[in-house]
Image (tube, rainbow, N blue to C red):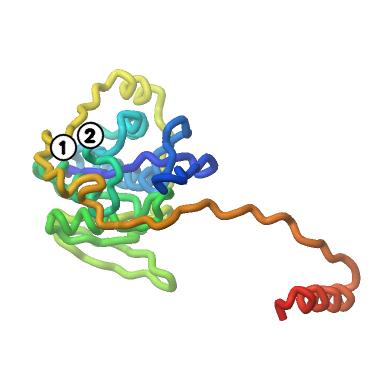
């Protein structure tokens, strides 16, 4: 199987800062990691290749520092990695991002399966995977918790809010996976050493024949009006004692604050 896994490098969730002028995440000087859902996507691809043979190619769009995320994916066991980086991609929303990744995959050539994490921790939109499938004109199955491949078909078990759903689709297709699918493996020392020496190609907008009017801010119809971090609330009053007494005092406090 020829499997492509699309990943994203995201800021460590405990270190997120927002530029008050541009309303975008500040990434410079902020510790970055592979989006956790994407680690499950990598693991899923590796398991399928171990079972059916083939290779796993990992791609990401981002600044030069995103190469580290690809090194980490190689250390997990991926075979190849491609960084797509160009100033023309700066400020991309989910539509522009999915277009750019689709152009990247078209340049890569034939594939059997594309796997993505269900969403990114920094954006939480869950739109890039489905958008990528739409640009490529292939079937998509989201929120996968289990995948079985047989011939040119995939049987996917989906995790819904109150039930499971089993869907069968033809290959090639795109699948987004949830955390419950697997436990991502730790990188072996051997793979870490190999990943350090591996040369990772960097493709620009020209390399993937991207229409720059559909990339970056130019290709992003999303208009962010305001982004802010929620304020931390101080701890309220702690009520202790007999249950009936506590309830009476709580009701009194709520009435004084005109909550009830």
Tell me: 137 left or right of 198: left
Residue 133 seen in render: yes
Q: Kindly state the secondary structure of the residue where label 1 is placed.
A: loop
Q: Nearer the viewer, residue 6 or 57?
A: 6
The residue under the point 17% across, 59% down is 134
Q: Position of residue 202 (x, y in %)?
A: 21, 29
The residue under the point 87% across, 65% down is 240
Query: Could you tell me which quadrant the N terminus lies in?
Result: top left
Q: Position of residue 250 (x, y in %)?
A: 81, 74
Q: Residues within 10 Å of mark 2 (few under 14, many from 20)?
A: some
Determine the residue located farthest toward the bottom in the rendered image.
Answer: 260
User: Residue beneath label 1, please?
Assistant: 205
Q: Position of residue 86 (x, y in %)?
A: 22, 34
Q: Nearer the viewer, residue 42 or 210?
A: 210
Answer whether labels 1 and 2 touch (C-beta < 8 Å).
Answer: yes
Q: Nearer the viewer, residue 161 or 147?
A: 161
Residue 210, quarter of picture: top left
Q: Which mark is residue 93?
A: none
Vertical order, 211 against 166 (above or below): above
Vertical order, 244 against 1 (above or below): below
Q: Alpha carbon of mark 1 to alpha carbon of mark 2: how far?
A: 6 Å
The residue under the point 89% across, 76% down is 245
Q: Nearer the viewer, residue 29 or 58?
A: 29
Vertical order, 175 against 204 (above or below): below
Tell me: 116 left or right of 163: left
User: Residue beneath label 2, please?
Assistant: 86
Residue 38, quarter of picture: top left
Q: Position of residue 96 (x, y in %)?
A: 23, 50
Residue 76 seen in render: no
Q: Kindly state the secondary structure of the residue where label 2 is placed.
A: loop
């Amino acid at each position: 199987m020829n499997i492509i896994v699309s990943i994203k490098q995201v800021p460590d969730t405990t270190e997120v800062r927002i530029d008050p002028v541009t309303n975008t995440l500040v990434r410079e000087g902020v510790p970055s990691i592979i989006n956790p859902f994407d680690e499950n996507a990598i693991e899923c691809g590796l398991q399928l290749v171990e079972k059916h043979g083939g290779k796993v190619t990992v791609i990401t769009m981002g600044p030069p520092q995103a190469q580290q995320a690809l090194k980490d994916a190689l250390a997990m066991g991926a075979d190849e990695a491609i960084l797509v980086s160009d100033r023309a991609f700066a400020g991309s929303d989910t539509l522009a991002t999915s277009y750019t990744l689709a152009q990247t995959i078209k340049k890569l050539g034939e594939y059997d399966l594309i796997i993505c994490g269900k969403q990114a921790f920094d954006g939480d939109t869950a739109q890039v995977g489905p958008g990528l499938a739409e640009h490529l004109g292939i079937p998509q199955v989201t929120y996968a918790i289990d995948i079985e491949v047989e011939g040119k078909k995939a049987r996917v078990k989906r995790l819904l809010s109150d039930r499971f759903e089993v869907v069968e689709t033809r290959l090639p297709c795109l699948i987004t996976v949830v955390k419950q699918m697997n436990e991502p493996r730790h990188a072996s020392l051997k793979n870490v050493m190999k990943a350090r020496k591996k040369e990772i190609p960097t493709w620009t907008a020209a390399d993937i024949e991207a229409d720059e009017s559909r990339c970056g801010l130019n290709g992003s119809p999303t208009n962010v009006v305001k982004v802010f971090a929620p304020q931390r609330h101080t701890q309220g009053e702690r009520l202790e004692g007999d249950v009936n007494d506590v309830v009476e005092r709580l009701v009194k406090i709520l009435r004084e604050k005109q909550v009830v």
